[in-house]
């Protein structure tokens, strides 16, 4: 009895993989042979955004989408406010001092510490402070029947120590290496908008607010309290007024000189760090330093820990400004 073939049974013979199916596999084998990792979906999306027509995404949309894709590489240290710039209040401060600091700092939240910022105790929200002040009958902000029920002796007004007001809220703690996206999720879950960045020894490295993380996606979010003055602006005499925290790249672009090419710039990122590294110390207010580079630096504002503001002179412009004006020519005597 003859064997029945696949064709006689109506079954299709197994087909060899088509060249179309083999191409991706072959491509992946070649990538593996040369030690190349397979392309990620994240890279594919970014390439698609770059190659998309301008009509599909506005420049702002493309920038935000790219920032979202790059967020997995952003660490807490990349978005934090450094310790030197953290505005905080002592636990022993009076409510008058707290209110005054809120007024001058322009923040809605302040970290609170005991002895130093390395001993944080929480944070205070300006709304909690206002609610506490409004409950004090001396301010006349509550109805008289309710004021009579309150303990007037316990209300010490604006001289009440912050530690006695019981209006502190907890604050999150995060290491500098923590992904910023993970911290954002923790902030959302705990409904806490502030985190202190703690180093390996338990000291405070800096501060991160939820706004800092969001700005890494959508760009700077300025409000009425943010400074609008640029960190670098030119003076009429050829000099530049520079905020010490201005990045070297931004200063280089404004001045027209590559400060990052200097030897002292290898371990620093700001113009203030460059001047400090070159001097080997923190220069004091009023000091004038020659170098690094063909520049002269006048320290306009500083404290014992850091430079805050400086005036940068190109030496050529400085020498030209200091050169005496030529004497007027004497009129020729008549014969």
Image: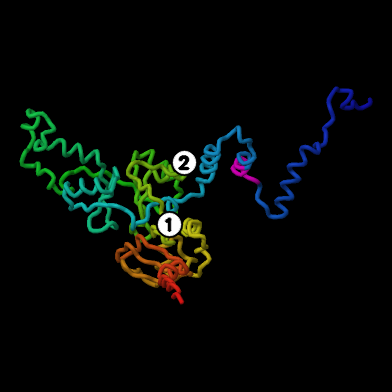
**Disc on the earlier residue, 1 or 2:** 2
Q: Main secondary structure of the magenta part?
A: helix
Q: In the current view of this chain or complex, which residue is farthest to the bottom?
A: 335
Within-10-Å neighbours for mark 1: few <14, some 14–19, many 20+? some
Real-space CA distance between mark 1 and mark 2, rounded to the nearest whole angstrom: 29 Å
Within-10-Å neighbours for mark 2: few <14, some 14–19, many 20+? some
- What residue sits 84% from the left and 30% below the top? 13
Report the front residue among 124 and 273.
273
The label shown at residue 117 is none
Q: Does residue 238 appear anywhere in the picture?
A: yes
Point out the frontmost of discs 1 and 2.
Answer: 1
Where residue 283 appears, x then y in whole percent?
34, 69
Q: Colour scheme of this structure image?
A: rainbow
Q: Is residue 29 magenta?
A: no
Q: Secondary structure at mark 1?
A: strand
- What residue sits 90% from the left and 25% below the top? 4
- What residue sits 71% from the left and 50% below the top? 31
Q: Does residue 290 appear anywhere in the picture?
A: no
User: Which residue is tagged 1?
Assistant: 234
**Image quarter for residue 241?**
bottom left
Please tell me how many numbered marks the rendered image carries: 2
Report the front residue among 290 and 222.
290
Say which quadrant the N terminus sits in: top right
Residue 289 located left or right of residue 47: left
Vertical placement of 103 versus 266: above or below?
A: above
Where residue 330 appears, x then y in whole percent?
42, 73
Q: Secondary structure at mark 2?
A: helix
- What residue sits 76% from the left and 38% below the top? 21
Vertical placement of 61 versus 8: above or below?
A: below
User: Which residue is tagged 2?
Assistant: 218
**Image quarter for residue 59?**
top right
Q: Which residues are magenta?
A: 39-46
């Amino acid at each position: 009895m003859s064997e029945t073939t696949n064709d006689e049974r109506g079954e299709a013979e197994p087909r060899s993989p088509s060249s179309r199916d083999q191409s991706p596999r072959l491509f992946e084998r070649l990538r593996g042979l040369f030690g190349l990792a397979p392309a990620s979906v994240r890279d594919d999306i970014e390439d698609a955004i770059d190659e998309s027509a301008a009509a599909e995404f506005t420049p702002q949309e493309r920038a935000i989408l790219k920032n979202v894709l790059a967020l997995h590489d952003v660490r807490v240290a990349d978005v934090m406010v450094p310790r030197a710039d953290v505005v905080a209040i002592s636990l022993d401060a009076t409510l008058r001092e707290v209110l005054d600091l809120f007024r001058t700092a322009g923040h809605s939240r302040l970290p609170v510490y005991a002895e130093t910022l390395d001993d944080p105790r929480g944070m205070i929200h300006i709304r909690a402070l206002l609610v506490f002040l409004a409950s004090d009958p001396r301010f006349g902000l509550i109805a008289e029947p309710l004021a009579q029920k309150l303990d007037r002796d316990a209300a010490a007004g604006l001289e009440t120590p912050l530690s006695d007001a019981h209006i502190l809220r907890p604050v999150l703690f995060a290491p500098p290496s923590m992904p910023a996206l993970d911290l954002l999720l923790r902030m959302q879950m705990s409904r806490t908008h502030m985190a202190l960045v703690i180093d390996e020894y338990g000291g405070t490295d800096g501060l991160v607010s939820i706004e800092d993380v969001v700005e890494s996606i959508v760009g700077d979010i300025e409000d009425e309290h943010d400074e609008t003055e640029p960190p670098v602006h030119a003076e009429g005499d050829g000099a530049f007024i520079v905020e010490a925290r201005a990045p070297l790249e931004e200063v280089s672009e404004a001045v027209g000189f590559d400060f990052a090419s200097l030897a002292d710039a290898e371990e620093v990122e700001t113009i203030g760090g460059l001047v400090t590294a070159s001097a080997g110390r923190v220069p004091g207010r009023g000091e004038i330093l020659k170098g690094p580079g063909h520049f002269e630096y006048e320290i306009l504002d500083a404290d014992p820990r850091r430079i805050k503001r400086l005036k940068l002179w190109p030496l050529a412009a400085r020498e030209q400004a200091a050169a005496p004006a030529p004497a007027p020519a004497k009129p020729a005597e008549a014969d």
